[in-house]
């Protein structure tokens, strides 16, 4: 697609998002041909949503970083979307069910970036070890995803990426200084809905260690001439399968040694 077609593709997605309307998919000619083009559409989408008052991008979510989520979605590689300032909540919150089309929840760990992660001048890639010093704090987190598609299983991966890969909102625990967190290869995460446990896993399920996901994102951004900046938040992936929720459901998560969060859909 040329620049005008990229913007029109993003415009279709932005309009559906702002109107809270489901969409079958992108029309022929406005569907990203590959992942690289998908992120170009996504960047245009972020600009349009900012202009529409939906919110400014202040971080990223990474999907499909665990085996359970890759099996659930049938996608075997990580995919990134945006976090918007208007969609960040803390500790415990009520969410208006009608603000979503088909909401779901995930149990995640999130990172607060304390210093810029600028690519090396020699082009060497980021690693788990090289990104770790930039993480100032960690959170236990709920990602609220929204299935904005008539049938998401029929939508190709580049189109899902173009639309922020189901991103909708987050609820963060109190921040835990990164130096005070437990071993992130083994920390356990749990999620309950209405008091009943619906899933558990370990943060090591996230590509072996959550910082591997952060390094993946840093390298993905570098390929696009971008980088993670101080003050941004990154959702690193879900340790449980997505659970779709109904009005009245109360969802709680806890990442042991990091923190917990709660959301009730009203």
Image (cartoon, helix red, strand yellow):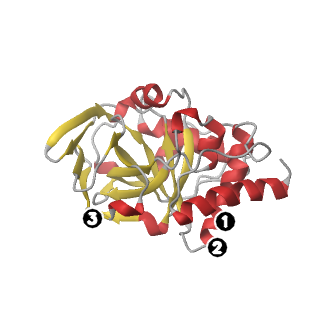
| Residues at circles 1 and 2 in contact by the CB criterion of under 8 Å | yes
The residue that mark 1 highlights is 47
Q: Residue at x 58, y 50 (%)?
A: 23
Tell me the distance, in whole angstroms, between the alpha carbons under discs 3 and 1: 27 Å
Taking the view exactly as shown, the residue that stands out farthest to the left is 195
Choose top left, top right, bottom left or bottom right for residue 210: top left
**In-image side of 241 versus 39 (left or right):** left
Q: Residue at x 25, y 55 (%)?
A: 261
Q: Callout 3: helix, strand or loop?
A: strand
- Callout 2: few (<14), some (14-19), or many (20+) C-alpha neighbours within 10 Å? few
Q: Residue 229: image x %, image y %? A: 57, 59
Q: Is residue 53 above or below residue 5?
A: below
Q: Position of residue 265 (x, y in %)?
A: 27, 58
Choose the circle earlier in sequence order: 3 or 2.
2
Q: Is residue 91 above or below residue 198?
A: below
Disc 3 to disc 2, C-alpha distance: 26 Å
Q: Which residue appears at 61% of the width and 70% of the height?
A: 50
**Where residue 159 is drawn, which disc sits there?**
none
Question: Which label's residue is closer to the chain start, 3 or 1?
Answer: 1
Q: Residue 10's spot in the image, x, y percent?
A: 69, 56
Q: Name which quarter of the figure residue 174 lies in.
A: bottom left
The Cα atoms of the two marked residues, 1 and 2, are separated by: 6 Å
| Badge 1: residue crowd in 10 Å (few <14, some 14–19, many ≥20) | some
Please, what secondary structure does the residue beneath circle 2 have? helix
Look at mark 2 in the image and give the residue it sits on.
51
229 and 246: which one is in front? 246
Please state if 139 lies on the left or on the right of 25 as rendered. left
Indicate which disc residue 93 carries.
3
């Amino acid at each position: 697609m040329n620049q005008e077609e990229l913007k029109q593709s993003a415009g279709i997605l932005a309009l559906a998002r702002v109107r809270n309307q489901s969409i079958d998919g992108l029309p022929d000619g406005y569907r990203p041909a590959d992942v690289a083009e998908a992120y170009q559409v996504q960047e245009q989408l972020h600009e349009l949503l900012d202009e529409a008052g939906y919110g400014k991008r202040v971080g990223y979510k990474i999907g499909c970083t665990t085996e359970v989520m890759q099996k659930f979605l049938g996608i075997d590689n990580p995919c990134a979307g945006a976090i918007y300032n208007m969609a960040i909540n803390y500790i415990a919150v009520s969410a208006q069910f009608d603000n979503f089309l088909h909401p779901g929840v995930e149990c995640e760990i999130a990172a607060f970036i304390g210093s810029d992660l600028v690519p090396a001048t020699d082009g060497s890639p980021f690693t788990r070890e090289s990104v770790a010093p930039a993480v100032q704090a960690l959170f236990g987190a709920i990602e609220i995803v929204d299935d904005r598609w008539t049938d998401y299983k029929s939508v190709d991966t580049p189109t899902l990426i173009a639309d922020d890969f189901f991103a909708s909102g987050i609820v963060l625990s109190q921040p835990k200084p990164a130096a005070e967190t437990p071993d992130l290869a083994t920390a356990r995460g749990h999620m309950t809905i209405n008091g009943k446990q619906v899933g558990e896993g370990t943060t090591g399920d996230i590509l072996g260690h959550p910082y591997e996901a952060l390094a993946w994102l840093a390298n993905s951004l570098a390929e696009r001439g971008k980088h993670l900046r101080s003050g941004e938040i990154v959702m690193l992936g879900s340790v449980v399968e997505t659970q779709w929720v109904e009005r009245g459901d109360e969802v709680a998560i806890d990442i042991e040694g990091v923190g917990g969060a709660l959301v009730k859909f009203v």
